[in-house]
Image (tube, rainbow, N blue to C red):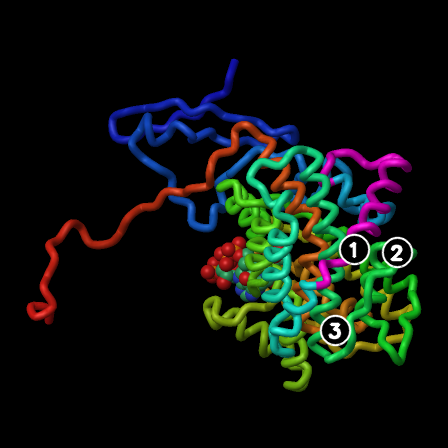
């Protein structure tokens, strides 16, 4: 028998269907709620609202579980490369050898951007934040591929846009960095794989060739994979809601980049390092900042702590912490900010405020230490998150437009403003 929830509003009781996901999580289907009860739901931040059905990523925040298409994140991070992970997220299955080779080869073919687009970079001041530049550039790709920037692309066209975006994003990010430091652009090299190609475009210069460091490449591979998808997070929901109006994928991803930029989301990795540097400069008085976070009623937050969904631990943070230790040891780097981070984590995790609120280090807490060790500049940290998250955005956009149940995203509201009143001429206003 179909399970139902009962809701009583005034003297009327209505029945609402319960839907069950493949991992047995349950949702009350309220799609007919307004027509049957006259009420809508009120859920700021959508903490209890399922906006879609999705088969891409499963996470259980209480148990600290994260699966991509059913595969535990730990196994994917250990065994896959980033391109393979992108394929898995977008197409639902791990690629076989031929599929992976074709997919990788198409990246090589599409790595360059239109020469005219280089002019855009000259228009930005060197201090412009690379996330703003990235979003504008990704949206601008729609002008160069008008045949792909359409409301309802075919499957083949979606494949082409996905490859264009995944491949070109590296070039755009590296070019914006080169422009900001006044060095000539380094073009993608066809013989290099996804991550070495990106690092080469970032770090090679006329005076110095970048030497591929496998430890750096591996650390970055793991970071990109851990960032690749996280179900209905703020930026992915943005991509979905923008795309639900049938805006093209370039435009939808550009919006997602802007959502990711915020310090409570992907911008947190930059903020974490700024916070750790501040604590370090202030004599490493970790307790002072833990107290500040407790006493400031949300004004000052420990960046890299807390998560809407994870209430036990963030499995990504666990893996990143191990990778951080391993990379720094391998490279013989002693980063004093890592010491501050470890101390901060230790003190916060024992503090009743953080225990009661179930606040743990999240994916952004240690990732910045790795980026620093690789030499990625601070304001590029959120950009690294964006490169990593791109497969997830594409997968969700594709899933959304292929789902016949998709409707334009349009939440309701509870209006709390003035009730009807008559216009007052200016001379009679107080
Ligand atoms: N430091 C201190 N207090 C915190 C923190 C923090 N980092 N995070 C939450 N709290 C407190 C908050 O003040 C509130 O306290 P009270 O109940 O007394 O009002 C309580 O914990 C619940 O917080 P919330 O803001 O209602 O929780 P949320 O689920 O809406 O927010 C969050 C989640 C990630 C935005 C938040 O934890 C936060 O701001 N963290 C710092 C920024 C950060 O690290 N963001 C990266 C998130 S992971 C990467 C990603 O996917 O984006």
- Find the magenta span and give its range: 89-115
Q: Position of residue 274 (x, y in %)?
A: 64, 76
The one of 308 and 237 positioned closer to us in this rendering = 237
Q: Residue at x 77, y 39 (%)?
A: 88
Q: Residue at x 37, y 30 (%)?
A: 33
Element under disc 3: helix
Q: Quadrant of the C terminus?
A: bottom left
Disc 2 crowd rating (10 Å Cα; few below 14, some 14-19, many 20+) is: some
Could you tell me if residue 183 is visible in this image?
Answer: yes
Q: Position of residue 237 (x, y in %)?
A: 55, 47
Q: Tell how many labels.
A: 3
Query: Is 394 situated above or below 190?
Result: above
Element under disc 2: loop
Say whether disc 2 or disc 1 marks the residue closer to the N-terminus. 1
Could you tell me if residue 355 is visible in this image?
Answer: no
Residue 177 sits in quarter:
bottom right
Say whether disc 3 or disc 1 marks the residue closer to the N-terminus. 1
Q: Quadrant of ligand 1?
A: bottom right
The one of 392 and 278 positioned closer to us in this rendering = 392
C-alpha span from label 3 to label 1: 16 Å
Q: Which residue is mark 3?
A: 178
Q: Is residue 187 left or right of residue 15?
A: right
Q: Which residue is mark 2?
A: 190
Q: Residue at x 78, y 71 (%)?
A: 185
Q: Which residue is mark 1?
A: 111
Secondary structure predominantly adopted by residues drawn in magenta? helix
Q: Is residue 230 left or right of residue 407?
A: right
The one of 69 and 174 positioned closer to us in this rendering = 174
């Amino acid at each position: 028998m179909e399970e139902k929830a009962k809701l009583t509003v005034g003297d009327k009781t209505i029945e609402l269907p319960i839907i069950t996901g493949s991992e047995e999580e349950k949702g009350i289907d309220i799609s007919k709620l307004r027509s049957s009860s006259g009420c809508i739901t009120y859920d700021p931040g959508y903490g209890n609202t399922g906006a879609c059905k999705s088969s891409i990523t499963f996470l259980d925040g209480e148990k600290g579980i994260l699966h991509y298409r059913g595969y535990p994140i730990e196994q994917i991070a250990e065994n896959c490369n980033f391109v393979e992970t992108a394929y898995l997220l977008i197409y639902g299955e791990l690629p076989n050898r031929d599929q992976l080779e074709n997919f990788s080869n198409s990246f090589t073919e599409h790595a360059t951007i239109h020469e005219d687009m280089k002019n855009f970079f000259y228009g930005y001041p060197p201090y412009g934040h690379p996330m703003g530049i990235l979003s504008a550039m990704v949206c601008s790709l729609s002008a160069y591929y008008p045949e792909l920037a359409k409301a309802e692309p075919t499957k083949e066209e979606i494949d082409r846009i996905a490859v264009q975006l995944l491949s070109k994003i590296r070039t755009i990010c590296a070019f914006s960095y080169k422009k900001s430091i006044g060095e000539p652009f380094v073009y993608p090299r066809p013989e290099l794989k996804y991550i070495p190609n990106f690092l080469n475009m970032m770090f090679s210069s006329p005076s110095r060739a970048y030497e591929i460091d496998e430890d750096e490449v591996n650390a970055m591979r793991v970071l990109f994979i851990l960032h690749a998808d996280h179900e209905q997070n703020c930026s992915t929901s943005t991509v979905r809601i923008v795309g639900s109006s049938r805006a093209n994928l370039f435009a939808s991803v550009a919006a997602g980049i802007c959502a990711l930029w915020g310090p409570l989301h992907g911008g947190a990795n930059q903020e974490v390092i700024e916070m750790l540097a501040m604590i370090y400069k202030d004599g490493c008085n970790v307790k002072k900042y833990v107290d500040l976070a407790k006493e400031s009623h949300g004004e000052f937050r420990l960046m890299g702590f807390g998560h809407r969904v994870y209430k036990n631990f963030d499995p990504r943070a666990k893996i990143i912490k191990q990778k951080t230790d391993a990379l720094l040891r391998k490279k013989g780097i002693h980063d004093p900010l890592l010491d501050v981070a470890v101390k901060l984590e230790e003190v916060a995790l024992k503090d009743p405020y953080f225990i009661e609120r179930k606040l743990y280090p999240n994916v952004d807490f240690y990732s910045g230490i790795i980026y620093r060790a690789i030499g990625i500049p601070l304001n590029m940290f959120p950009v690294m998150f964006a490169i990593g998250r791109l497969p997830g955005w594409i997968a969700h956009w594709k899933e959304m437009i292929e789902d016949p149940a998709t409707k334009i995203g349009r939440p309701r509201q509870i209006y709390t403003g003035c009730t009807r009143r008559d216009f007052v001429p200016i001379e009679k206003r107080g």
